[in-house]
Image (spheres, rainbow, N blue to C red):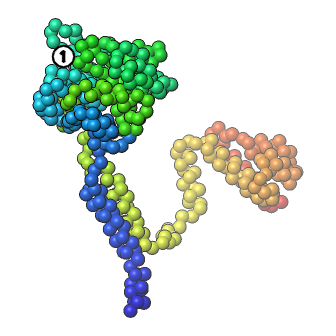
């Protein structure tokens, strides 16, 4: 009985392999769909990865700050409305918010901490939200932190910056206007800018708030002192859902369906399964002769007609000369490594003729078809003389 089962397995080995591949693929697909999805968004409070901000949220919570993460504009506005003295952290990396939405946020928040804002975001925030008798904040972009400055000193009288001390300057942006701190040497602005009325704070680095570098230098202290001034902090990361009807996604990657990344592995599995299935069934490749044998003379005549139609005198002359030298070298037993000059010298000695005359004949360049035909006949006559010698 065992022998019969093992024989069945050997006969259906391809089917067994195909079934195993399909089963493994289905298991991986189901597991990927059912497994809990981790948050990988930059500066997300739920992201425990290097670019997340879970550590900052936990530190703020231990210091009595209630942090509300908002995933869309309506949730952020509701959280601001339910707080007496709210601070808003805004990180609109892709520029999803419109000018009207930014103005509403500025009017609803007592303080705004905006991280690496775009020009449009910064323009909307600095042009709204201030009382009529106050000076409008005028913070503007000034450049980037040079690569050779991984650590920046406060360099300003701002109490929060002085207490925090040096911070990481990697991949940072600089801003000018108001009170600027952490200014790179020779730069026009600093990585931290605070408006004169202290309602708007611009932080030009996500590194300071990220989990990976939070414990380095004074990053944690600056984050706590900048974001922990009020009991309520609304942590708002705009998303694609915040686009107004007239807006448009910033890239094609945001429009693609969620199943597109899994299409490639599935196609690979299907291709491998087809190879295993059809490859063994079709068997190895075998040689099958053509039903028609084309004679060499017909091939030569066909090529000659092509040269004639194209008036390719040079190509025809080169082929005739090369063929003649190859055949003569074989008859003179010179070997494949013999040069044209050696073949001509050997031919002259065999026929007792001057080498210059033979060289002139072989290297002639016929200018007309009639001369090409005559020259080919002379080469043929030369080969006949060698055979008869």
Q: Is residue 45 above or below residue 156?
A: below
> Where in the figure is residue 61, as x and y percent of width and height?
26, 36
Describe residue 210's horizontal placement relative to residue 308 as left or right.
Answer: left
Q: Is residue 266 above or below residue 90?
A: below
Which one is nearer the viewer's eye here, 81 or 332? Answer: 81
The residue tagged 1 is 128
> Where in the figure is residue 161, as x and y percent of width and height?
37, 21
At x 71%, y 52%, the residue is 324
What residue occupies the far bottom of the structure in this picture? 1
Mark 1 surroundings: few (<14), some (14-19) or many (≥20) residues within 10 A: some
The mark tally for this picture is: 1
Which one is nearer the viewer's eye here, 31 or 374? Answer: 31
At x 24%, y 47%, the residue is 257
> Where in the figure is residue 352, as x and y percent of width and height?
88, 51
At x 57%, y 55%, the residue is 301
Q: Quadrant of residue 202?
A: top left
Q: Quadrant of the C terminus?
A: bottom right
Q: Is residue 300 above or below residue 192?
A: below
> Where in the figure is residue 370, as x and y percent of width and height?
63, 43
At x 66%, y 42%, the residue is 371
Tag 1 secondary structure: loop
Q: Quadrant of residue 19?
A: bottom left
Q: Quadrant of the N terminus?
A: bottom left
Describe residue 19's horizontal placement relative to residue 291 as left or right.
Answer: left
């Amino acid at each position: 009985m065992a022998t019969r089962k093992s024989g069945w397995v050997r006969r259906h080995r391809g089917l067994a392999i195909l079934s195993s591949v399909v089963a493994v693929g289905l298991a991986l697909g189901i597991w990927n769909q059912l497994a809990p999805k981790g948050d990988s968004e930059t500066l997300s409070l739920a992201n425990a990865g290097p670019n997340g901000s879970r550590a900052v949220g936990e530190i703020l919570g231990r210091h009595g700050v209630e942090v509300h993460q908002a995933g869309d504009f309506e949730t952020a506005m509701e959280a601001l409305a339910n707080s007496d003295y709210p601070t808003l952290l805004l990180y609109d990396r892709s520029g999803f918010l419109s000018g009207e939405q930014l103005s509403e946020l500025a009017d609803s928040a007592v303080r705004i901490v905006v991280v690496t804002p775009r020009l449009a975001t910064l323009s909307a925030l600095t042009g709204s939200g201030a009382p009529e008798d106050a000076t409008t904040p005028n913070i503007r972009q000034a450049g980037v932190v040079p690569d050779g400055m991984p650590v920046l000193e406060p360099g300003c009288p701002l109490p929060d910056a002085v207490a925090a001390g040096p911070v990481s300057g990697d991949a940072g942006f600089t801003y000018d206007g108001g009170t600027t701190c952490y200014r790179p040497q020779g730069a026009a602005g600093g990585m931290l800018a605070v408006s004169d009325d202290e309602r708007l704070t611009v932080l030009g680095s996500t590194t300071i708030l990220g989990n990976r570098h939070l414990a380095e230098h004074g990053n944690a202290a600056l984050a706590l002192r900048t974001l922990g001034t009020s009991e309520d902090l609304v942590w708002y990361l705009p998303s694609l859902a915040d686009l107004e009807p007239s807006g448009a996604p910033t890239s094609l990657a945001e429009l693609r369906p969620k199943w597109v990344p899994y299409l490639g592995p599935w196609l690979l599995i299907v291709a491998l399964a087809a190879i295993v299935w059809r490859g063994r069934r079709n068997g190895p490749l075998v040689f099958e002769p053509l039903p028609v044998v084309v004679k060499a003379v017909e091939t030569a005549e066909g090529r000659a007609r092509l040269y004639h139609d194209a008036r390719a005198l040079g190509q025809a002359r080169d082929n005739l000369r090369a063929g003649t030298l190859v055949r003569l070298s074989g008859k003179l037993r010179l070997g494949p490594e013999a040069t044209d000059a050696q073949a001509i010298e050997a031919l002259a000695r065999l026929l007792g003729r001057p080498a210059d005359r033979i060289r002139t004949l072989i290297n002639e360049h016929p200018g007309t078809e009639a001369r090409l035909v005559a020259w080919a006949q002379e080469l043929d006559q030369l080969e006949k003389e060698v055979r008869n010698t």
